[in-house]
């Protein structure tokens, strides 16, 4: 008797213990009986858990059934592969979107960074910072250096320091450009090789990394040989630097380095009149940030970020150090961190503040007694000839917009000076 055709079942992919089995419909003697398949669950040992009709002798050959299984397996794998490709593509677009969002966020942070100034990790903390040891007398094993920040009274300090060094008994060998015989004033590098009389007192517009090499070459502790070393010692030294309120310092720098020097050159050659540099006080406030960013003195320097110019590794790269406000957050962090560490946190340097000269003098008496008798607040050298003029509130805000980092460092230097006085 003819049998009712069994219902065709589709394979269920991705389920453990499920397979497809084919059954013949129609009479046992019908050579044209059709094949159908039913889902058969199996346990882990391959035993059928669903009952089914017994196979007749006219069931399809095993190899034909195997071909059908392979066919459906291929379709299942193809479906899985398609889904995987779609998922990967979607994931890639998601990552791209998130990356773009992060980039936009980073750009926004860089623009607003100057307003928030989140340098708390580098701020001066008296409880976690050590104070320098007073230096009675500079020597080869413990030299002294003055890091001159431009337009902060440094020319006067150089002259006073040179007098102090030559008054010592015996006189100390010096490397102070403008004061030591034969040294050009605009010398930014301390000596990198030994001479017949190595200096013990330095003072000038020096880059801190240059002095680091000088210390390694000329001022090794005596117990270490003059040879290569796997673990070189940390040389001893003492340093002093003088800071000035940034708006005032930048104003003075512009008038002296840009305007005064430019006018002096124009007296000798009548050209480039279209590029005539004017005083900041005569400039439109909206033009000041751009001028301070792009202008360079005849020595190739701008007027912004002087502490970072002296103490960070970016000192001799004007496009970076002068224009920190245009650079990514990581570069700003690195420059400010190095400046704070080397100038204050490492405990080798004393800072003074031009606007607090009497406090600075007291600190010099305590930490550098050899220099104290020659330090004077009344002496003033290298005055400019350009009348500065008064900056308006709008002009001050314009200068401050590109001088935020120097203002923050100046604030930390004042906190450090407070501790040095009260110690």
Image: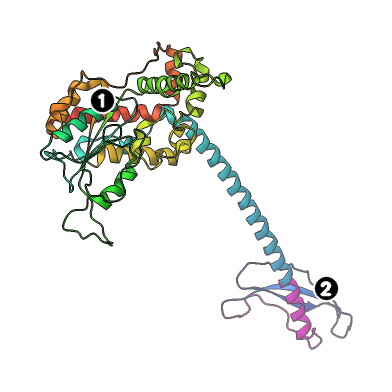
Q: Is residue 155 above or below residue 331?
A: above
The answer to whether residue 111 is magenta is no
As rendered, which of 241 and 155 lies closer to the eye? 155
Which numbered disc covers residue 87? none
The secondary element bearing badge 1 is classed as helix
For mark 2, give the secondary structure: loop
Q: CA distance from mark 2 to mark 1?
A: 114 Å
Q: Assess disc 1: are there few (<14), some (14-19) or many (≥20) residues with their C-alpha within 10 Å of its C-alpha.
A: some
Residue on which disc 1 sits: 156
The residue identified by callout 2 is 4
Q: Is residue 319 left or right of residue 347?
A: right
Q: Nearer the viewer, mark 2 or mark 1?
A: 1
Snapshot quadrant of residue 59: bottom right
| Left or right: 267 in relation to 186 | right
Q: Is residue 325 above or below residue 82?
A: above
Q: Which residues are magenta?
A: 45-73
| Residue 86 in view here | yes
First in sequence, mark 2 or 1: give its number: 2
Percent x, y of residue 352: 23, 28
Residue 348 makes an appearance in the image? no
**Which x, y percent locates residue 251?**
40, 20
Q: Residue at x 18, y 53 (%)?
A: 221
x%, y% of residue 320?
Answer: 46, 37
Residue 117 quadrant:
top left
> Viewer-proximal residue, 145 or 349?
145
Residue 71 located within the stretch drawn in magenta: yes
């Amino acid at each position: 008797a003819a049998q009712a055709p069994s219902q065709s079942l589709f394979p269920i992919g991705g389920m453990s213990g499920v397979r497809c089995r084919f059954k013949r419909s129609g009479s046992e003697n019908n050579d044209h009986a059709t094949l159908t398949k039913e889902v058969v669950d199996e346990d882990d040992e391959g035993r059928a858990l669903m009952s089914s009709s017994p196979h007749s002798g006219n069931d399809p050959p095993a190899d034909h059934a195997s071909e059908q299984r392979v066919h459906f397996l291929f379709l299942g794998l193809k479906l899985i592969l398609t889904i995987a490709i779609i998922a990967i593509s979607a994931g890639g677009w998601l990552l791209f979107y998130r990356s773009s969002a992060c980039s936009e966020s980073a750009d926004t942070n860089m623009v607003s960074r100057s307003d928030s100034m989140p340098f708390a990790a580098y701020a001066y903390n008296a409880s976690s910072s050590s104070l320098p040891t007073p230096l009675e007398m500079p020597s080869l094993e413990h030299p002294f250096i003055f890091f001159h920040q431009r337009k902060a009274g440094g020319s006067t300090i150089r002259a006073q320091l040179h007098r102090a060094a030559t008054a010592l008994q015996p006189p100390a060998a010096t490397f102070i450009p403008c004061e030591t015989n034969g040294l050009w004033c605009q010398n930014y590098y301390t000596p990198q090789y030994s001479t017949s009389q190595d200096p013990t007192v330095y003072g000038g517009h020096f880059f801190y990394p240059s002095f680091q090499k000088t210390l390694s070459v000329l001022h090794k502790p005596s117990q270490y040989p003059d040879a290569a070393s796997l673990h070189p010692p940390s040389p001893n030294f003492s340093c002093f630097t003088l800071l000035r309120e940034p708006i005032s310092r930048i104003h003075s720098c512009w008038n002296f380095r840009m305007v005064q020097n430019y006018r002096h050159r124009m007296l000798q050659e009548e050209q480039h009149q279209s590029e005539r540099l004017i005083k900041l006080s005569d400039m439109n406030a909206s033009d000041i940030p751009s001028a301070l960013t792009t202008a360079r003195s005849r020595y190739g320097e701008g007027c912004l970020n002087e502490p970072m110019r002296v103490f960070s590794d970016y000192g001799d790269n004007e496009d970076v150090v002068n224009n920190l406000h245009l650079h990514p957050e990581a570069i700003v962090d690195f420059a400010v961190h190095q400046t704070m560490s080397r100038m204050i946190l490492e405990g080798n340097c004393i800072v003074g503040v031009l606007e607090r000269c009497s406090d600075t003098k007291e600190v010099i008496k305590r930490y550098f007694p050899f220099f104290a008798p020659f330090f004077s607040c009344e002496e003033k050298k290298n005055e400019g000839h350009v009348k500065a003029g008064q900056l308006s509130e709008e002009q001050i805000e314009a200068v401050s917009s590109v001088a935020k980092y120097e203002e923050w460092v100046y604030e930390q230097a004042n906190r450090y000076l407070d501790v040095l006085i009260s110690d």
